[in-house]
């Protein structure tokens, strides 16, 4: 068997429902596969005797009324439904796909009812939700790159005249162009600039476009979702987002592209937060967060978008409390950065959790002159968060604690100490303070700190080994014979802690590798994707780990949604009796992937010698 066939087999093994296929079945299947490749906008003609599997790219499906039905991406199937075969299928981007004879496919798997159920019954709905056709109706679940029109990202040189840019935008019927220099994003020019900077100011149209461009524009990574783009636009009051891949512009997403979104709930909730004037107002809004989780799950929203939405509401409440505090206390005497840590920084919150936050102050800070102001500010915010359901941190990792309310120079000494002397306490702090996001104030204070910190984590192999060893503390609850190792929680004698023994091992794994490579992003899935991009981890291994993370988290979210619907407090202890037999199988597969990656991490960082 040649290398190409082995690569196809590896891909099939990581694709539902073929993850349970044996090697002989996959080898037989590969012999029957035909490979197809079509350019963007090509209209496919599906033959009813074949199944189709997307290997790379995206296929847009429209119904008989030319209305969007779905967008299918990598590892997704088409051609299995007689109704869908009649719909229009076109390549939204250059697409590589596999074409498989249905007769041979179902003969190979005739003894495996789960395969038939996957296509014929509700298999797509009862297994991993990312395969769910119904869910694909929401464009917000797709990456911003697949939602954008890549050809509309017109790149121009900063010396191009305003007149030439206006003619280009008019001829191409676009509302923005991207200014690049040395292939790097330099600025953006939107149609609004011609009103506010050209017509209103009477600017000479022969002047270079650099005179009217917005410098250092906000951008978004190519793998981010539509809902992240929507929230970023709403919070930043902008209508255009350049899309970057490896720091180069590959597309443009606009507010108009997002008009097709289905759910505005999170945006409306955040808008309510932004006009709230009291803690009491914010508390009423925060009480809707569990319902947001429940509604989002029942609407088949992607798990990443659920956690991103809920984290965004939490950050907005933080921000509004800070604005209220400044309204009562006056403007701050020195610059400060309000920084959240942990799951909120990573955009991975679900039900209300405890708060982790800190304050980075300018080195102009003087405790005698300024201490009282920041003590009052932090107590107002942390007390308000507690009122809103974000309870006080049991470990006192809050800005109310003077230890975590310090100038940049002190924070620098903290990080140096943790990295150079990785004792158990330092490692505990590392799991908190290396996942940071400034959400209010002078973000440059955190920006000033992080490059040096990440440079040290990248170079210090002893610190990396200790971090990896610490990341082995929580392991998936899977026994030697692929049986669940259950906990006892409340009245349920057989539960799985899907936070500590499910998602935390993956979060810790991603953090270790990200810090060892000096990667700044903190979201777990983003870290894994960045590691793929720089080839620090294999694409197949990291992709498997991302899917495992998403599925484990989705089971956790489903459990919490069920508890919320029943009027109970949400927790992370999922009774095994709640989990369908098919999902139990997928859960065991996911735990197996995590265990394998933990073993690889242990070997890579030589944790056995510690």
Image: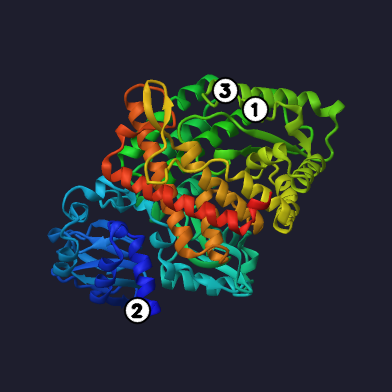
- Check residue 474 in the rendering and tell me which mark sits there, or answer none: none
**Does residue 438 show up?**
no
- Looking at the rendering, in which quadrant would you find the N terminus? bottom left
Q: Nearer the viewer, residue 269 or 591?
A: 591
Contact flag, marks 3 and 1 (Cβ < 8 Å) = no
- Check residue 1 in the rendering and tell me which mark sits there, or answer none: 2
Q: Residues within 10 Å of mark 1 (few under 14, many from 20)?
A: few
Q: Residue at x 61, y 51 (%)?
A: 512
Left or right: 513 with respect to 86?
right
Left or right: 483 with respect to 315?
left
Q: Position of residue 212 (x, y in %)?
A: 61, 63
- Check residue 395 in the rendering and tell me which mark sits there, or answer none: 1
Q: CA distance from mark 2 to mark 3?
A: 61 Å
Kind of element beneath mark 3? helix
The single residue placed furthest to the bottom in the displayed view is 2
Query: Eyeballing the image, is 441 above or below 136?
Result: above
Contact flag, marks 2 and 3 (Cβ < 8 Å) = no
The mark that comes first in sequence, 3 or 1, is 3
Kind of element beneath mark 2? loop
The mark that comes first in sequence, 2 or 3, is 2
Contact flag, marks 2 and 1 (Cβ < 8 Å) = no
């Amino acid at each position: 068997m040649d290398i190409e066939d082995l690569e196809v087999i590896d891909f099939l093994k990581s694709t539902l429902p073929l993850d349970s296929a044996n090697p002989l079945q996959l080898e037989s299947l590969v012999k029957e596969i035909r490979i197809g490749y079509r350019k963007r906008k090509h209209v496919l003609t599906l033959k009813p005797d074949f199944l189709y599997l997307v290997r790379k790219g995206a296929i847009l499906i429209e119904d008989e009324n030319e209305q969007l039905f779905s967008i299918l991406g990598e590892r997704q199937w088409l051609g299995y439904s007689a109704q869908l075969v009649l719909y229009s299928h076109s390549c939204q981007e250059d697409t590589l796909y596999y074409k498989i004879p249905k007769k041979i496919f179902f003969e190979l798997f005739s003894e495996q009812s789960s395969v038939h159920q996957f296509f014929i019954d509700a298999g797509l709905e009862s297994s991993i939700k990312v395969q769910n056709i119904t869910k694909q109706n929401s464009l917000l679940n797709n990456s911003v790159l697949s939602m954008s029109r890549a050809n509309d990202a017109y790149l121009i040189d900063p010396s191009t005249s305003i007149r030439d840019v206006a003619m280009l935008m008019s001829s191409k019927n676009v509302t923005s162009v991207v200014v690049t220099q040395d292939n790097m994003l330099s600025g953006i020019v939107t149609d609004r600039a011609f009103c506010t900077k050209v017509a209103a100011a009477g600017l000479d149209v022969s002047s270079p476009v650099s005179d009217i461009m917005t410098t250092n524009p906000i951008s978004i990574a190519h793998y981010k979702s539509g809902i992240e783009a929507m929230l970023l636009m709403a919070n930043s009051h902008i209508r255009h987002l350049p899309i970057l891949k490896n720091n180069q512009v590959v597309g443009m997403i606009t507010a108009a592209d997002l008009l097709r979104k289905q759910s505005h709930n999170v945006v409306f909730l955040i808008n309510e937060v932004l006009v709230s004037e009291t803690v009491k107002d914010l508390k009423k809004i925060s009480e809707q967060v569990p319902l947001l989780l429940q509604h989002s799950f029942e609407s088949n929203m992607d798990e990443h978008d659920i956690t991103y939405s809920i984290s965004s509401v939490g950050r907005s409440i933080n921000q509004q409390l800070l604005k209220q505090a400044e309204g009562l206390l006056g403007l701050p005497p020195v610059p400060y950065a309000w920084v959240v840590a942990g799951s909120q920084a990573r955009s991975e919150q679900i039900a209300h959790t405890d708060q982790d936050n800190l304050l980075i102050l300018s080195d102009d800070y003087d405790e005698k002159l300024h201490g009282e102001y920041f003590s009052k500010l932090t107590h107002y915010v942390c007390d308000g968060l507690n009122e809103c359901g974000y309870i006080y941190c049991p470990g006192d990792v809050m800005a109310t604690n003077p230890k975590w309310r310090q100038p940049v120079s002190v924070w620098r000494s903290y990080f140096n100490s943790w990295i150079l002397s990785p004792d158990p306490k330092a490692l505990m702090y590392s799991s908190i303070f290396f996942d940071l996001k400034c959400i209010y104030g002078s973000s440059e204070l955190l920006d000033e700190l992080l490059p040096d910190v990440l440079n040290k984590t990248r170079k210090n192999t002893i610190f990396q080994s200790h971090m990896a060893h610490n990341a082995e503390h929580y392991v998936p609850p899977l026994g030697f014979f692929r049986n669940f190792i259950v906990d006892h929680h409340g009245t349920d004698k057989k539960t799985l802690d899907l936070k500590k023994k499910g998602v935390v091992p993956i979060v810790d794994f991603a953090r270790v590798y990200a810090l060892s490579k000096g990667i700044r992003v903190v979201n777990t899935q983003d870290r894994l994707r960045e590691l793929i991009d720089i080839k620090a981890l294999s694409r197949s291994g990291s992709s498997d780990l991302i899917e495992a993370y998403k599925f484990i988290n989705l089971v956790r979210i489903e459990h919490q949604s069920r508890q919320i619907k029943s009027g109970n407090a949400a927790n992370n202890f999922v009774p095994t009796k709640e989990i369908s037999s098919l999902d139990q199988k997928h859960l065991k597969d996911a735990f197996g992937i995590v265990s394998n990656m933990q073993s690889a991490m242990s070997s890579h960082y030589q944790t056995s010698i510690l």
